Amino acid sequence: MKGFWHKKKIEILIFPIVMVIISCSGPSNNLKTSVTLLHFDKYGGLSDLQGNNASGFFRAQLMDNRWVFVDPDNHIFFSVGADGIRFSGAGASPFFGFSQYTNNLMSIFPSPFQQYTKLQWVQETINRYKELGFNTLGNWSENGLTVFYDTIPYTVPMNFLSAVTNDFGSNNCPVVNKGFWTDFPDVYDPRFTQDAYAYARQTIMPGFIDDPWLIGYFPDNEISWFGGAQFWYNPDYTLADDYIALPSTYAGKQYWVNAFLRQKLGYTLNEINRLYGTTFTSWMDIMNITNLPNNQQYPQIQADKQAFIYDIASTYFSVTNGAIKSVDPNHLNLCSRFASYAPDQVVQAASNYCDVISVNDYYALDNTLSDIALGDPVKRWSRMFELTMINNPEGKPFIQSEFGIRGDDAGLPDSKGAGWTVRTQNERAQYYRDDINRLLGIKISGVTFMAGFHWFEWADEPATGRFDGENSNYGLVNIKDEQYTTVFDSMANTVRTLMYILDHKNPPVLNPPDSITATMLRNDAINLSWSTVPGADTYEVIVSPYRTMPSRFTMRFTDITSTQYTLPYSLPQGIWWFGVKALGQNNIQSDFSTLTGFTVNASMNNSMLCMDMTDLGCFTNNITDTFPNPDNAVGDGVVVPEEAIKDTAVQSAMIGFTLNSLALQAGLPVSAIVTLGMNEIVPITSSAVFSFDVYPDSLYTPSGLYRSATDFVYLRLILGNTILYDAPLPQSLPVYTWSTIAVSLSGMNVTGVTPEFYVDAHAKDIPYDQRIVFYLDNIND
């Protein structure tokens, strides 16, 4: 239905964050003037904009030549979110037999009862969704009815094809082909309709039917519409050829001969022989063939196959839509999600029954190989929308129900999974922005048809692979549930910019700082500086030993009013990364700048931090080629000053280890060592006691036991080349409280030691792929 967006004033602000960026280049607006704020209703719809929806449920409508959703409160709603919002993450790793993501959550939100941890995870996820501006739980997510109850609009995945071919025993629908994900059923067999309706009755929960928070259903995922297990269209072998190859006893083969050729097309044997170049003498001859090759001299063969594909697809979409609507007439059919595209006839058929067309698409921007494999994305998406206009003059709305890209810097193999890779997390965030801008910029007959974007996926996959071997950096959070800081901030800005545009408001612009530099001062301090950003009131600095900026291992320094900042810590030796963002009035913020790297190295005696810039090998700016990651295959150990635990001097530290499961899987040596190096060699007084306070986190082990992080940590004290002490820390130290550890060195002529902490990778029940973290303070203080 065409109409206008009617303005009205609503003061309730459910999603109050309004930080926005338009671009990373170009002049900024004068942010000293007032900024028009966005207002959202409880569903995440734009409160200023009304649709024409009195149903009390989500609907898709064409408003001012733009396809959008309209929420149950009759406000314009653009669907943005992520797939796979699950407490199990990407699922269990077969190598371990359990979900490492879940175990990490049990460590972060410790509780002897998993349901309590899950409740805390749900609240944390809701908070993060608000931070991102997301408003939709995409496919494969937790049941929104029972987990995210009345907090985030949600979608429900269904699996008609798997169910009808597997779940009904002797009444299973026969299979036409073995697809790349699921088998394709004989949709003309009566059992297909019977099983589909039975499956809908079993799967659609009674609570769904009247739930206004439910957007709609995805009937299936990435069906093999191309025939066989093919991923793209091959005109010489299609889904129609699968049916033609069936035995004569199949309903689909009988339908092709008797209903399609004889009745719908009205062919006689003579006409078929003339059009196909064949010599059939009876209809049974046709029933018994197993192939009908295309022939350029007889183009009607291919034309009729394409018409038959349309018939097959129409039957599938008619039955699945009817099954869903027979149980739940209130919610949308979001369509079976296409894998990048589908044969023209399938898209056209889908538009007759689906309320929204969903496409999973992992194309790469301006990439020749991607264009060769999938076709130019703008042309491909334009074509799909034009196909929906054949039987529907206004077309149908589309959502990109899966898209994503993986970063090389996350430390995951990225060797299996859809799509492409980029070098860094910053490039992943830029891909998100570019993808949305690219597809939203398409207009066909003046109509903008993109109504939503769902990122794949919420959490990274395990390094050892999920159920199908995928092992990639798709997540907005890593397997330790640490959000990628720069990705989060940039995505939030992209979403809020989009909402401003939809609300017919000019988005305020604030560019990120540039000219980022770091300088080592003579007092061991690190001074960071950057250029002035017009319109900025304050700046925020992030510093981490990891370029991925995982939230738990990233220090954030806020409310900086100048264009330089001296860190309050003398950083340990190693490679460090930092970035800066600008903030204006009303919390308007830029993206973070391009991250800049620098190194802090020990001096020649391996005990002192670099003191000045005279030794160029000691301190280097703008590291671009080599950077550590928190998930590399041999484990890692870092020291990060942590101000949140105790307000102390620079001897306060956060020590963390990760033992990566890839090394265990491959039988490689796994090690993780932290050389303290917070200052010089730690001095030991005449009492010859090395002491420190420790504050351990909890861990959830593979056996299901909670343990103190220090249960797995060893301390080694070194004097020169001599190891004075090498033993585990006291076992079972209480978690989330301070304990003092003292190591006696009496009888030794000790003037100072270099402490090392390390993890025994062969310890019993060790939690691989978790952060083994504790805090350190008052070192020999």
Image (cartoon, rainbow, N blue to C red):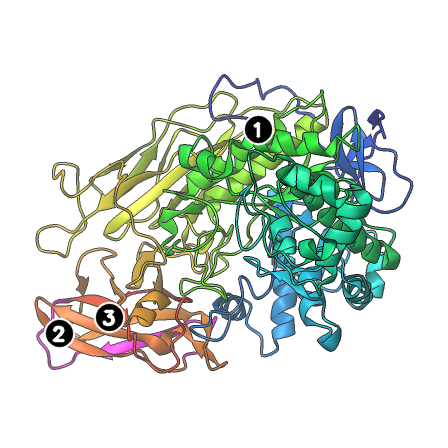
Residue shown at 68% from the left, 55% from the top: 285
Residue 200 image offset from top left, x and y in percent: 79, 63
Element on which disc 1 rests: helix
Which of the two marks, 1 or 2, is nearer to us in this view? 1
- Quick check: marks 1 and 3 in contact, CB under 8 Å? no
| Residue identified by numbered label 1 | 379
| Residue identified by numbered label 2 | 723
In screen coordinates, is 386 left or right of 11? Answer: left
Within 10 Å of the Cα at label 3, are there few (<14), some (14-19), or many (20+) other Cα atoms? Answer: few
Residue 620 appears in the figure? yes
Residue 473 image offset from top left, x and y in percent: 44, 52
Q: What number is the disc on residue 669?
A: 3
Residue 536 image offset from top left, x and y in percent: 51, 26
Which callout, 1 or 3, points at the residue further toward the start of the chain?
1
Compute the Cα span from label 2 to label 3: 22 Å
Q: Residue furthest right?
A: 54
Q: What's drawn in magenta, residue-wise?
A: 733-752
Residue shown at 41% from the left, 54% from the top: 553
Q: Is residue 476 above or below residue 658?
A: above
Compute the Cα span from label 1 to label 2: 67 Å
Residue shown at 84% from the left, 27% from the top: 2
Magenta span contains residue 744: yes
Quadrant where the C terminus is found in the figure: bottom left
- Quick check: marks 1 and 2 in contact, CB under 8 Å? no
Which callout, 2 or 3, points at the residue further toward the start of the chain?
3
Q: Amino acid at mark 2?
A: Ile
